[in-house]
Amino acid sequence: LVSLLALLYTCGCAMKSLYVVEVGDPKIPRFPDSCIICGLSGPEKLVETTVTDEATRVDFFLYSLPISPAQGSKIDVPVHDSCAKTMRNRFLKEAAATVMVAGLIIGLSGIYGRYLGAAWAIGFGFVVAFWMFQSAKMVPFEFNRTLSGYIFTFADHHYAERVAALNGVQIKTGTDPYTGR
Ligand SMILES: [Zn+2]
């Protein structure tokens, strides 16, 4: 099970390139008038959503829910309400499916009164795998506030280029969504 999880994690990372834009202080980072998720400006009106550097992806996953964690440095980014909701709902469906499968395995073993220990281990493994998968998954945008400025990582090359041009900096590539290295 552990090696399966490790494999899942490695596949999830798959060292796909990310596009990194660093904006140093005291500049205020600027974003184009288009959605950070789909890259388009229309037809829907753009809204600003606040994300934090502690868990940018979690802020997207829990978009407009009152349970959004709000720790760390914050920044407002432009999104379409529908794009952010689609991303959130996909995450919630996957989370619900994982919990259901884990619950089903544990429930069935409970009904038959057999292999309960193994069922709990497998159920727990499912939840851990889900968490690892979500952590390694490619998301449109993440950022890190450092001592000297902001490090933005984008999945989309075109969007990253526009942000770099707006802020007068060069685009870089990296593979780590958390540090941009
Ligand atoms: Zn959009």
Image (cartoon, rainbow, N blue to C red):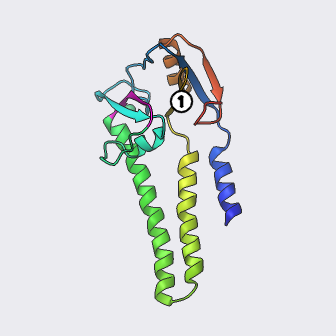
Q: Residues within 10 Å of mark 1 (few under 14, many from 20)?
A: many
Residue located at (46% from left, 75% from top): 104
Residue located at (44% from left, 31% from top): 73
User: Quadrant of the image for the N terminus?
Assistant: bottom right
- The local secondary structure at tag 1 comes to strand
Q: Tell me where residue 97 appears, x and y as whole percent.
A: 45, 63
| Residue found farthest to the bottom | 113
| Residue found farthest to the front | 147
Residue located at (58% from left, 84% from top): 115
Relative horizontal placement of residue 74, taking residue 172 as reference (left or right): left
34 vs 96: above or below? above
Q: Tell me where residue 15 appears, x and y as whole percent.
A: 68, 39
Ligand 1: quadrant of the figure: top left
131 vs 11, nearest the viewer: 131
Which amino acid, by three-letter code, is at mark 1?
Phe
45 vs 106: above or below? above
Relative horizontal placement of residue 22, taking residue 27 as reference (left or right): right
Q: Main secondary structure of the magenta part?
A: strand
Residue located at (45% from left, 56% from top): 94
Magenta part of the protein: which range? 72-80
Asked if disc 1 is less than 8 Å from ligand 1, the answer is no
Magenta-drawn stretch contains 61 = no
Magenta-drawn stretch contains 78 = yes
Instruction: List the residue tagged with mark 1.
Output: 154
Q: Tell me where residue 31 appears, x and y as whole percent.
A: 42, 20
